[in-house]
Image (cartoon, rainbow, N blue to C red):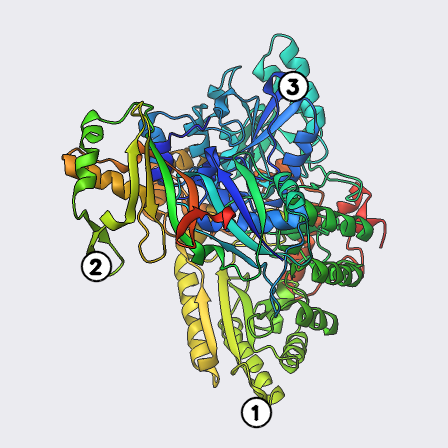
């Protein structure tokens, strides 16, 4: 029995988003289940189903005999008004039953621009939007994912946040829940007990005090048994843990329509703009033999025609060559495509790519992130112009002619020269092509360079968490400078330039370093029609500006203000393992343009060694 | 070796469109271990061809696809292997070996039989039932057909081979031209009948099930797995 009527399914776009029933989806006998868990990715099905973390936890929960985990995604904008009109409660895909009847609603929060979608999920489920309004019969609403490293703007909407990697503590939480349900269930009492489990942050148990200038003064636990700071959870051994043998295979084409093999977590590089590079420390590799077996199992169990490697920096995986050679052999036999993430361009990767890609169609990708060496040193991006030009030379020799370059605009301390350097670098790559490939050998046409810039947004737990974000006007001016620079180059006809939108970067900046007082603005924006803010077609900037004005929020306070070095941050209540002192040191070094060596070369004492695993102990 | 696979499609999976069903079968081939042949070239793809797309929302007892095998395999084994990896609602009904000179599934399609009912579970409007013989006795039955470029007036009478209501009045069965040049949708016949009776037509009121798909064999129409 489907939750949506035939008439509705026949009038909306892609009805297969809402029917469940996919290969490897799990249906259990609910009479034999103690805990029903609704796992939600608050965006449309095709995005949510492409997320590896959801597949890992779905598989793990359903391996527990007493738990049935189902999926929930945001109804698309065509279905949303129909559900409201017909009073249809939001349902989980597998059972097609209302989310409201579940024990848990778990929401993965992967980007700031999904916050109004979270409210839509709660609203359509008929669960009170604020944690404080929920009763004993409402599902426990838990959040996880990278945005929970500063969950404060959405703290009012969640009962608790699971900080860190999901594999470690859910069993304990479920057992605690069952124990509490067996007696006289009291939601508040349960949450107090949850807060005693490592990694669990229950925002309602902390009182926030502010200084007169609006900055945070302190976080005070309301209960002495609750920890002052919550330290993230990590998986100690990534080989001996949960990983799905048979992930769900969607009927409709989703963004990540392939087997995804996560080869490691964390990153040794320490780029100063990158949040993932800090919060997932330390680097932990999965055993190569485990990955080989897993790849074969997953290909056999899904029937996917493509496999892809996943990690923050695959070139740093110590057994990459062995793994890739194995996959090439295995996939050739099975007629499976290999999609390689952006690898550092060297002899090995060029050789591998020429085996697995169609050179005519594929492009090579560089992410210099900044246009000059000075700026790259500031951001600790250990990629030199020589590396880039040598890599390009090698690729051009082997037949490639398409290059993609990724940069950021608005980095701390950026000058006009740094922005113009983007055009200069792109031009040098074009020249490298014409020097490398003689005219008669340009059978794939002349070089085509695509330059893309995004706007830099300072994120919590990075060395740039103190830095001011550029204003919208500065962003636009820099994009213009960058474009003019490209236009003035000799090979400008060979260079295409794309830039990211500015309005949405401002909103992302507010939320990234926001505090608890923003929840009212999110609520107002949602009530006034903001939804799917991550989609440029549906993003309503005016609604957001209105919401901030109504709630007396000073946007500049969150975005363009330079924070003092001893400011207490809203996210100081979370401990990601990397110390604030280390981040301060890194911020100072960035101002001096001093590069910090990566974790493989040298331990820089970031604090992640306290976990006692990964690269911190096995260099 | 070339084999023809007959499958049925019922329930929730009827909302999965034709392109996604094709992708589903490609994955099912890999998952089941059926030794399907691949094209040669830089990016090999499975040699597979579907008979006739089924509209989203329709059910079917008689869908067909042809595949080329890389090695000889017993048809019953192929059927068993595929059925072991199907999702609820899709069942492999039959697998038959095709002669080497058989035309491909899509080109072979000549006709299809449909069963239509009301989603409400009610019987059809008596006026429609009474009017059917008069409707079919017309020399010509014109309908307007919207194409991407313009609107065409088409006579569907020659393509309606059979049409009848059952005794209960719950089901309307029709046997229609399904060839590439003259394909008639079952719902079009219902619409024409409604128009003939001046009864309002709402396409979402009807449930359509394709009962089988037919090919032309020596002048007779036979199901695609009986050629």
Q: Do labels 2 and 1 share a chain?
A: no
x and y, in percent, of residue A260 in the image: 65, 50
Residue lying furthest left: B198
Sequence order check: which comes first, mark 1 or mark 3?
3
Q: How far apart are marks 1 and 3 (CA)?
A: 71 Å
Name the residue carrying label 2.
B150
Q: Which chain carries label 2?
A: B
Q: What label sits on residue A440 in the rendered view?
A: 1
Name the residue carrying label 3.
A177
Q: Mark 3 lies on which chain?
A: A
Height in image: A128 above or below A565?
A: above
Q: Are marks 1 and 3 on the same chain?
A: yes
Q: Mark 1 lies on which chain?
A: A
Residue lying furthest right: A618
Residue A224 can be seen, yes or no:
no
Residue positioned 44% across, 33% down in the render:
A119
Of residue A471 and residue B77, the one placed in the foreground of this image is B77
In the structure shown, which secondary structural element does the residue marked by tag 2 occupy? loop
In the structure shown, which secondary structural element does the residue marked by tag 3 occupy? helix
């Amino acid at each position: 029995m489907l939750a949506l009527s035939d008439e509705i399914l026949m009038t909306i776009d892609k009805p297969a988003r809402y029917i469940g029933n996919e290969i490897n989806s799990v249906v259990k006998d609910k009479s034999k289940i103690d805990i029903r868990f609704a796992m939600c990715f608050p965006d449309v099905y095709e995005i949510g189903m492409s997320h590896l973390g959801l597949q890992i936890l779905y598989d793990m929960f359903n391996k527990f005999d007493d738990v049935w985990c189902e999926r929930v995604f945001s109804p698309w904008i065509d279905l949303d008004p129909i559900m409201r009109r017909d009073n249809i409660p939001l349902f989980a895909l597998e059972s097609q039953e209302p989310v409201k009847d579940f024990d848990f609603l778990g929401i993965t929060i992967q980007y700031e621009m999904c916050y109004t979608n979270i409210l839509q999920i709660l609203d359509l489920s008929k669960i009170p939007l604020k944690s404080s309004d929920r009763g004993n019969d409402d599902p426990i609403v838990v959040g996880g994912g990278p945005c929970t490293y500063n969950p404060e703007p959405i703290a009012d909407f969640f009962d608790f946040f699971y900080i860190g990697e999901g594999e470690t503590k859910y069993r304990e939480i479920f057992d605690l829940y069952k124990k509490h349900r067996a007696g006289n269930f009291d939601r508040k009492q349960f949450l107090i007990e949850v807060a005693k489990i490592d990694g669990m942050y229950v925002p309602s148990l902390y009182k926030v005090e502010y200084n007169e200038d609006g900055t945070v003064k302190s976080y005070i636990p309301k209960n002495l048994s609750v920890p002052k700071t919550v330290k993230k959870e990590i998986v100690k051994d990534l080989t001996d843990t949960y990983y799905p043998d048979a992930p769900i295979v969607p009927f409709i084409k989703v963004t990540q329509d392939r087997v995804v093999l996560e080869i490691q977590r964390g990153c040794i590089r320490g780029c100063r703009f990158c949040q993932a590079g800090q919060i997932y420390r330390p680097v932990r590799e999965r055993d190569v033999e485990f990955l080989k077996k897993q790849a074969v199992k997953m290909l056999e169990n899904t029937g996917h025609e493509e496999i892809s490697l996943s990690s923050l920096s695959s070139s740093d995986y110590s057994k990459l060559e062995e793994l890739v050679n194995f996959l090439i052999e295995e996939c050739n036999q099975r007629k499976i495509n290999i999609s390689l993430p952006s690898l550092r361009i060297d002899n090995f990767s060029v050789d591998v790519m020429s085996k697995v890609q169609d050179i005519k169609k594929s492009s090579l990708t560089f992410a210099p992130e900044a246009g000059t060496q000075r700026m790259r040193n500031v951001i600790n991006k250990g990629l030199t112009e020589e590396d880039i030009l040598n890599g390009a030379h090698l690729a051009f020799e082997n037949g490639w002619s398409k290059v993609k370059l990724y940069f950021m605009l608005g980095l701390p301390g950026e000058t006009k020269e740094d922005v113009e350097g983007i055009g200069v670098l792109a031009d040098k790559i074009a020249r490298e092509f014409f020097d490398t490939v003689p005219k008669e050998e340009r059978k794939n046409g002349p070089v085509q360079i695509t330059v893309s810039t995004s706007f830099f947004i300072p994120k919590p737990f990075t060395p740039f968490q103190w830095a001011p974000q550029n204003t919208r006007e500065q962003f636009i001016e820099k994009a213009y400078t960058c474009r003019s620079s490209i236009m003035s180059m000799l090979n400008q006809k060979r260079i295409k330039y794309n830039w990211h939108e500015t309005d949405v970067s401002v909103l992302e900046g507010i939320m990234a370093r926001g505090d608890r007082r923003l929840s009212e603005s999110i609520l107002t924006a949602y009530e006034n029609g903001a939804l799917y803010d991550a989609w440029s077609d549906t993003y309503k900037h005016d609604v957001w500006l209105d919401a901030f004005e109504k709630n007396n929020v000073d946007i500049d306070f969150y975005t363009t203000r330079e924070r003092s070095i001893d400011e207490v941050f809203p996210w100081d209540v979370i401990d990601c393992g990397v110390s604030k002192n280390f981040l301060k040191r890194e911020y100072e070094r960035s101002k001096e343009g001093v590069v910090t060596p990566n974790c493989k070369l040298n331990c820089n004492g970031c604090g992640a060694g306290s976990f006692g695993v990964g690269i911190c102990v096995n260099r | 070796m070339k084999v023809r696979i007959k499958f049925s499609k019922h329930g929730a999976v009827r909302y999965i469109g034709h392109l996604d069903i094709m992708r589903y079968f490609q994955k099912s081939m890999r998952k089941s271990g059926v030794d399907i042949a691949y094209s040669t070239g830089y990016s090999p793809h499975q040699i597979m061809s579907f008979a006739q797309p089924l509209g989203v929302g329709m059910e079917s007892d008689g869908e067909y696809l042809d595949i080329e095998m890389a090695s000889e395999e017993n048809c019953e084994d192929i059927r068993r292997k595929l059925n072991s990896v199907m999702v609820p609602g899709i069942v492999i009904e039959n697998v038959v070996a095709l002669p080497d000179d058989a035309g491909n599934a899509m080109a072979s399609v000549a006709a299809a039989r449909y069963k239509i009912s009301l989603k409400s579970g009610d019987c059809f409007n008596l006026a429609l039932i009474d009017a059917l013989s008069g409707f079919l006795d017309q020399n010509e039955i014109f309908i307007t057909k919207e194409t991407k470029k313009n609107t065409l007036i088409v006579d569907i009478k020659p393509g309606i081979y059979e049409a009848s209501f059952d005794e209960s009045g719950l089901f309307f069965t029709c046997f229609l031209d399904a060839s590439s040049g003259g394909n008639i949708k079952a719902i079009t016949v219902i619409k024409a009948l409604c128009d003939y009776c001046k009864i309002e037509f709402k396409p979402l009121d009807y449930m359509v099930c394709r009962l089988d798909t037919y090919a032309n064999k020596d002048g007779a129409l036979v199901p695609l797995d009986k050629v």
